[in-house]
Amino acid sequence: MKKNVGTNDKIVRYVIAAVALYMYFAGIATGTLGIVALVVAAISIVTSLVSFCGLYALLGVSTCEVKSQS
């Protein structure tokens, strides 16, 4: 898998995961919305850890920094 998630994107994904987990464990998101929050958090964390997003690959998007060849 070619990496397509950059550093700033990883930070945003971790923040989204933290907010989703907070909403679930604080009881703000319950029932179906709570399950959706947990799934969003899990996907955000996994894609950040492996630096690969399947949706980005399908759309041809990459937020990785391009290394200059000097």
Image (spheres, helix red, strand yellow):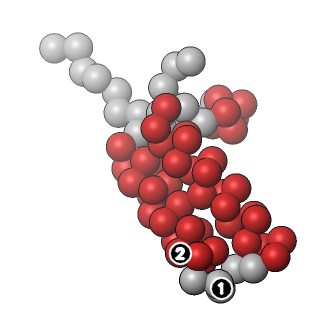
Residue 3 place in picture, x, y as percent: 48, 26
Left or right of 1, for residue 6: left
Q: In this view, does 5 lie above or below 69?
A: below
Q: Name the residue under label 2.
A: 22
Residue 24 place in picture, x, y as percent: 63, 74
Left or right of 42, for residue 3: left
Is the residue marked by circle 1 packed among few (<14), some (14-19), or many (20+) residues within 10 Å?
few
Q: In this view, does 42 lie above or below 48?
A: below
The residue lying at 54 percent from left, 32 percent from top is 52
Residue 15 place in picture, x, y as percent: 45, 63
At label 1, which amino acid type do we have? Ile
Name the disc covering residue 28, or none.
1
Q: Quarter of the image holding residue 59?
A: top right
The one nearer the camera, 1 or 27, is 27
At label 2, which amino acid type do we have? Tyr
Q: Quarter of the image holding residue 39?
A: bottom right
Is the residue marked by circle 2 packed among few (<14), some (14-19), or many (20+) residues within 10 Å?
some
Q: Which residue lies furthest to the top in this view?
A: 69
Residue 56 place in picture, x, y as percent: 63, 36
Q: Quadrant of the C terminus?
A: top left
Whether residue 63 appears in this view of the structure is: no
Q: Which SS class for mark 2?
A: helix
Mark 1 and 2 residues: CB-CB less than 8 Å, in contact? yes
